Image (tube, rainbow, N blue to C red):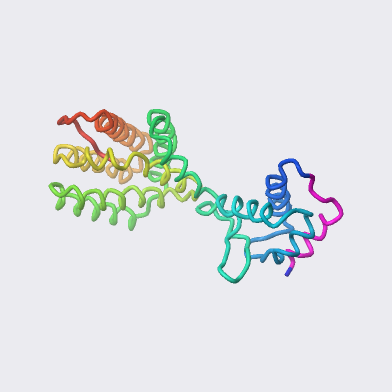
């Protein structure tokens, strides 16, 4: 178990009382950054960690909970604490929580979504394979069949965007995009109850795929930018409680 030896390096310097849980968190993060702790390592037993850091059981557990929220460790029932795979999907998981609590900053969130998804659109145009394009075409055909079905559309819309995130081939961008995609879902459910909204979304998706098929990153980026403009407009309208015939694609 290489992790216990790594922790022994710190045994000589007990953590001071001020901000002890935070300091435990930073000490463990430093061990991960330095490579003394690696993905899959099991942390020493709780009593051993208490001795190493010179902290109380409640303080240690608070630190471990914080590291779990950050996606750095996972607690296994009856099996102790392990370093996670340290992949982007684990480490960026708190973003989903942050975005869900930030509806009041919706315009700022959409500004971030533009930066991320327009870049993803460009990457898709440059890296999509014929198989990817074939799958996107099939998704468009399926969307056409559920244009009058809001629930069916929302399911297929999520699949479409997630496919774009995957084609781009950047796991960090993918996680960020998923986090922002999931914001203000309740308002977007209201907006996508209109067939006019879902129809506009499908048309936008077709333009995005056309750019990808042409291998034209600027065309694809422009199509995605227009799509996101439609999303923001109708999401804001839904948040204000207005019912309009405006477009609301996702």
Residue 92 horizontal side relative to residue 226, left or right = right
Residue 14 in the magenta stretch? The answer is yes
Residue name at image x 34 percent, y 32 percent: 225
Please state the extent of the stretch shown in magenta in the rendering. Answer: 2-16
Rendered position, 44 above or below 183: below
Q: How many marks?
A: 0
Give the quarter of the image for residue 132: bottom left
Return the residue nearer the eye: 14 or 195. Answer: 14
Return the residue nearer the eye: 239 or 136. Answer: 239
Rendered position, 49 above or below 154: below
Give the quarter of the image for residue 131: bottom left
Give the quarter of the image for residue 99: top left
Residue 220 in the magenta stretch? The answer is no
Image quadrant in which the N terminus is located: bottom right
Location of residue 51 in the rendering, given as x and y in whole percent from the top left corner: 79, 60
Residue 93 horizontal side relative to residue 215, left or right = right
Residue name at image x 68 percent, y 52 percent: 59
Rendered position, 132 above or below 240: below
Return the residue nearer the eye: 87 or 65. Answer: 65
Location of residue 20 in the rendering, given as x and y in whole percent from the top left corner: 72, 46
């Amino acid at each position: 178990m290489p992790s216990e030896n790594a922790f022994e390096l710190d045994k000589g310097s007990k953590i001071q009382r001020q901000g002890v849980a935070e300091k435990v968190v930073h000490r463990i993060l430093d061990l991960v950054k330095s490579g003394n702790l690696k993905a899959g390592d099991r942390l020493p037993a709780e009593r051993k960690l208490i001795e190493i850091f010179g902290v109380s059981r409640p303080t240690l557990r608070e630190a471990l909970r914080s590291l779990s929220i950050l996606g750095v460790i996972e607690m296994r029932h009856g099996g102790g604490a392990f370093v996670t795979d340290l992949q982007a999907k684990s480490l960026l998981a708190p973003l989903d929580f942050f975005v869900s609590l930030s509806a009041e900053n919706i315009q700022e969130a959409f500004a971030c979504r533009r930066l991320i998804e327009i870049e993803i659109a460009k990457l898709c145009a440059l890296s999509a394979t014929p198989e990817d394009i074939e799958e996107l075409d099939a998704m468009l055909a399926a969307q056409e069949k559920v244009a009058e079905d809001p629930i069916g559309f929302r399911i297929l819309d999520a699949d479409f965007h997630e496919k774009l995130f995957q084609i781009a081939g950047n796991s960090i961008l993918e996680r960020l995009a998923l986090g922002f995609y999931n914001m203000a879902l309740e308002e977007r459910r209201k907006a996508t109850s209109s067939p006019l909204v879902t129809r506009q979304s499908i048309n936008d998706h077709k333009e995005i795929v056309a750019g990808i098929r042409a291998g034209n990153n600027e065309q694809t980026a422009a199509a995605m930018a227009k799509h996101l403009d439609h999303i923001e407009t109708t999401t804001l309208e839904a948040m204000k409680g207005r019912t309009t015939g405006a477009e609301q694609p996702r």
